[in-house]
Image (cartoon, rainbow, N blue to C red):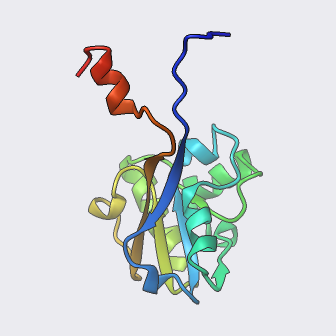
């Protein structure tokens, strides 16, 4: 459509701050809510990390769901193996904490853009999932922005 467009190929490389808490463990994965709910995805980067870092089992959180969390699973039935964040109001946080406290797992994997450990109490060890953009071709983003005088 645009023959003059510059194409930069890239991949998202999954990162995990504490792989020893995932390998061979039963894990609960907390994903970015809008990605898996409104975005119609069954899972996100947390699920990919659990598989990549050889979790023994991904624990289905649905049977442990409380309040607003239970409502989310009813509204978005395609979400089955991950716990989506439901917002950060007082009731939402209480229901997330109650749900998390009930889940029978070894480790809680946090795969949300914000580090929710600052606002939610976790009763078990946590591992933080992220991803880094890895450019696979040149020129890269920085090169293009520099050439255009943007940076």
- Residue at 56% of width from left, 73% of height from top? 28
Between residue 135 and residue 82, name the one nearer to us: 135
Q: Residue furthest front?
A: 138
- Look at the image and tell me in which quarter the C terminus lies: top left
Tell me where residue 121 sits by quadrant: bottom left
Q: Residue furthest right?
A: 77
Q: Is residue 6 above or below residue 123?
A: above
Q: Is residue 106 above or below residue 84?
A: below
Between residue 15 and residue 25, name the one nearer to us: 15
Count of numbered badges drawn on the protein: 0
- Residue at 52% of width from left, 62% of height from top? 30
Residue 126 placement (x, y as % from top left) = 40, 76
Q: Is residue 53 above or below residue 89?
A: below
Between residue 115 and residue 100, name the one nearer to us: 115
- Residue at 26% of width from left, 17% of height from top? 150
Residue 51 placement (x, y as % from top left) = 64, 72
Residue 42 placement (x, y as % from top left) = 71, 53
- Look at the image and tell me in which quarter the N terminus lies: top right
- Residue at 50% of width from left, 72% of height from top? 100
Q: Is residue 20 above or below residue 68?
A: below
Tell me where residue 147 sits by quadrant: top left
Residue 85 placement (x, y as % from top left) = 50, 53
């Amino acid at each position: 459509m645009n023959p003059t467009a510059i194409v930069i190929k890239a991949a998202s490389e999954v990162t995990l701050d504490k792989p020893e808490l995932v390998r061979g463990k039963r894990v609960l994965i907390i994903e970015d809510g809008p990605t898996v709910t409104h975005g119609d995805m069954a899972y996100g980067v947390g699920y990919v990390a659990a598989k990549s870092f050889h979790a023994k089992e991904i624990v289905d959180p649905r049977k442990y769901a409380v309040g607003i969390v239970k409502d989310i699973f009813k509204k978005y039935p395609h979400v089955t193996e991950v716990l989506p964040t439901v917002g950060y109001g007082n009731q939402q946080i209480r229901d997330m904490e109650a749900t998390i406290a009930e889940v029978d797992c070894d480790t809680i994997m946090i795969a949300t853009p914000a580090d929710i450990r600052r606002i939610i109490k976790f009763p078990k060890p946590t591992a933080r999932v992220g991803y880094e953009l890895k450019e696979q071709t040149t020129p890269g983003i920085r090169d293009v922005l520099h050439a255009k005088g943007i940076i």
